[in-house]
Image (tube, rainbow, N blue to C red):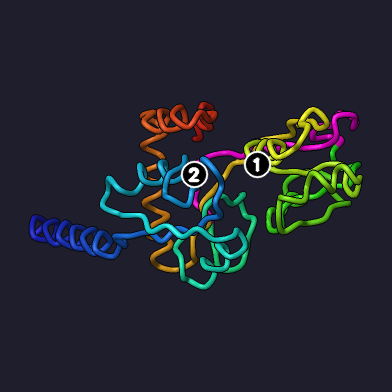
Amino acid sequence: MRGVWLAAVLGVQLLCAQLAQAETPKEIRLASEVWPGHTNADGSGLAWDVLRAVFEPVGISLELHSVPYTRSVGLVQRGAADAWVGSYLNEIKDGVFYPHWNYDADHITALGLADAPPVDIRTIGTFRLAWVRGYAYEKYLPNLTRYQEVYRRDGILSMLEMKHVDFYLDARTETQDVLNEADDPSRFRIDALTQLPLYLGFADTPDGHALAQVFDARMEKLVHDGSLRPIYERWQQPYPFDATKQ
């Protein structure tokens, strides 16, 4: 009887495993703003390469949607996408959830005039700031009280030159892109502030939860075996997992 019971239990476990596998989507719909070198509209970029390494070897293909950041969040909240790219932890509360693993990290910087006082994470809150709408740096950096959100990056240099704001906050790659548009880049300076892990924000749906489980399991494996490191080297970006998560 014990053998029959054990066989029945194993049979149920196998069936549950098969059902769980059958219920995992074969495609993940990912939405992201276009960040050069990170999530290019043509499907190239560090983030897309990392996510292909995560999902494609287990039979999950990527469907990519390039949209503005706030729209990418809205697509996930409505269930029209399974996850969006480039979120900070717990940035959005409504209709989404976050996995255990991040996939990258933003190196947050301040772009200002060259003759502006030097700033760091402790002093940045004493100045007038600007950043792109939806990035919500006030949730992650201390004592930010005087700030405004902008819809586009192409007016940032003028805002700084006319002293409408003291500093513009963004990831290092984006602040460098803004600075590259200056007629005289020597008039400006970039100061490093901090590093913020980057996450996928998943839809709070059965598909979203199933895909997040796959994501965490695969990231655990890929980080510990080191197979993601060449992707960051290829895109000339810092490897964010040298201090391995427990």
Q: Which residues are magenta?
A: 98-123
Q: Is residue 99 left or right of residue 69?
A: left
Q: Quadrant of residue 57?
A: top left
Q: Is residue 222 left or right of residue 192?
A: left
Q: Nearer the viewer, mark 1 or mark 2?
A: 1
Residue lying at the far bottom of the rendered structure: 78
Q: Residue at x 44, y 63 (%)?
A: 82
Q: Quadrant of residue 218?
A: top left
Give coordinates of residue 164: x percent, y percent.
90, 49
Give coordinates of residue 58: x percent, y percent.
27, 49
Judging by the rendered image, the residue that carries numbered circle 1 is: 174
The amino acid beneath tag 1 is Glu
Judging by the rendered image, the residue that carries numbered circle 2 is: 101
Of 156 and 126, nearer the camera is: 156
Within 10 Å of the Cα at label 1, are there few (<14), some (14-19), or many (20+) other Cα atoms? some
Give coordinates of residue 222: x percent, y percent.
37, 36
The amino acid beneath tag 2 is Trp
Identify the disc placed on residue 40: none
Q: Quadrant of the N terminus?
A: bottom left
Q: Residue at x 49, y 51 (%)?
A: 99
Of 138 and 1, nearer the camera is: 138
Is 32 located above or below residue 218 in the figure? below
Kindly report the secondary structure that dominates the magenta region of the rendered protein: loop
Q: Residue at x 49, y 66 (%)?
A: 204
Give coordinates of residue 243: x percent, y percent.
54, 28
